Image (spheres, rainbow, N blue to C red):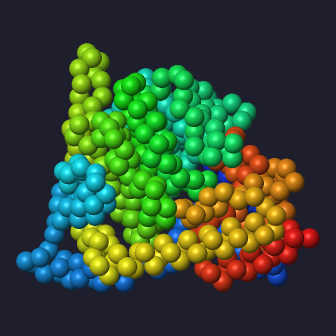
Amino acid sequence: MATINSNYLKLKAGYLFPEIARRVNAFADANPDAAIIKLGIGDVTEPLPEACRTAMVKAVEDMGDRDSFKGYGPEQGYLWLREKIAQHDFQARGCDIDPSEIFISDGSKCDCGNILDIFGRDNSIAVTDPVYPVYVDTNVMAGHTGPANEAGEYEGLVYLPINAENAFTARIPDEKVDLIYLCFPNNPTGAVATKEHLQAWVNYAKAHGSIILFDAAYEAFITDPAIPHSIYEIEGAQDCAIEFRSFSKNAGFTGTRCALTVVPKSLTGKAADGSDVALHTLWNRRQSTKFNGVSYIVQRGAEAVYSPEGQAQIKALVDFYLENARIIREQLTAAGISVYGGVNAPYVWVKTPNDLTSWDFFDKLLHTCHVVGTPGSGFGAAGEGYFRISAFNSRENVNAAMQRVTKTFKG
Ligand SMILES: *Cc1c(COP(=O)(O)O)cnc(C)c1O
């Protein structure tokens, strides 16, 4: 009889988004005339930049000609794309990253999960609370945790609370942890990390032989010139950090699929016999065995992000969402609600007014304003009392939603 990976049974049923859908549907059924505006989604809404579409159309034509047709590409991605990424995203910021240290993939979500393939079973693992659920659930699936408690915290994980009191940047742990997930600009809080904060993490990781798994999916939203875009802007990070990046949020590739992971050649982990092994070698082996590359057409689309037109078009996209975020921040603040994030990130993290729980605030917004957001408690126990509002929407929807909210909360 075939057995299953019983770690999957430890996973708390996907609760957050199904529960949101259940409540929204129940309300919509009872109030068929209500024009519900959804500011809960973590998906982009605006179409693909023209430069990317033009490049992909051309790539489709390449595929129709015997001379330019492409079969399997390199598992690591085409060199012409990796060179552009190395140059524009890293070398231009003073980070000494070589194209051979960049691995193209079809998403950061899968890379964040797959990276666990190359690490041992007994690492201690730290995540922030609240957190992007993928980091936690992939560790549960890999058998790195015990069961979850009432609050949804898994035994064996080190949770680092992030809240208004610590400016949404976690304390550096007293205990030794081997793997640390950091996400800046942060989903869900919209917070960013200063150079000093990241330097403290890098110093910690180097002192303890830990590896930082740095998710920079939202780096394009950084507006403050003092905030680092890459962990490799921090001295010593090339010895202790893997960085994940994606074209999903800067170029609207959520449905097109292209991302990258940087594994510096200087990074090592310990083998059972105590020797140091290069993580780059292991990840290269993992990808060459289990992955066959991103389609040529999509990689040409991603390459176009780095053309002058592409750069201008993705900047316009990011600016559009940031203006939505500004409107959300300004309107909520005017209504007397405390907000965080939304300056260097497409998410505004709201402190629920009148000490409402995250779900009570959800219900109040839905019932009185017909606006949907995401309860902070769904991202972790320490998210209780907070609420995420996404700037990924049309200007029209954002304006309409904010008018309704200010009307209700201004009294
Ligand atoms: C959207 C997002 C990503 C990007 O995931 P893809 O699989 O590349 O679309 C990565 N990390 C976080 C925290 C995100 O919110």
**Residue 339 sits above or below residue 233 on the image:** below
Residue 191 screen position, x and y as percent: 57, 53
Whether residue 367 is visible to the viewer of this picture, yes or no, is no
Res. 225 image quadrant = bottom left
- Residue at x-position 37% and y-position 84%: 50
Residue 28 is left or right of residue 341, and the answer is right
- Residue at x-position 28% and y-position 44%: 263
Image quarter of the C terminus: bottom right
- Residue at x-position 13% and y-position 81%: 65
Residue 54 screen position, x and y as percent: 30, 84
Work out which residue is located at the far right of the displayed protein and give it: 411
Image quarter of the N terminus: top left
Residue 285 screen position, x and y as percent: 22, 41
**71 or 100, which is in the foreground?**
100
Work out which residue is located at the far left of the displayed protein and give it: 67
**Residue 263 sits above or below residue 123 on the image:** below
**265 or 144, which is in the foreground?**
265
Residue 304 screen position, x and y as percent: 29, 75
Whether residue 149 is visible to the viewer of this picture, yes or no, is yes
Residue 323 is left or right of residue 204, and the answer is right
**Residue 12 sits above or below residue 314 on the image:** above
Total label count?
Answer: 0
Res. 128 image quadrant = top right
Residue 373 is left or right of residue 93, and the answer is right
**7 or 301, which is in the foreground?**
301
- Residue at x-position 33% and y-position 41%: 235
Residue 362 is left or right of residue 376, and the answer is right
Res. 210 image quadrant = top left
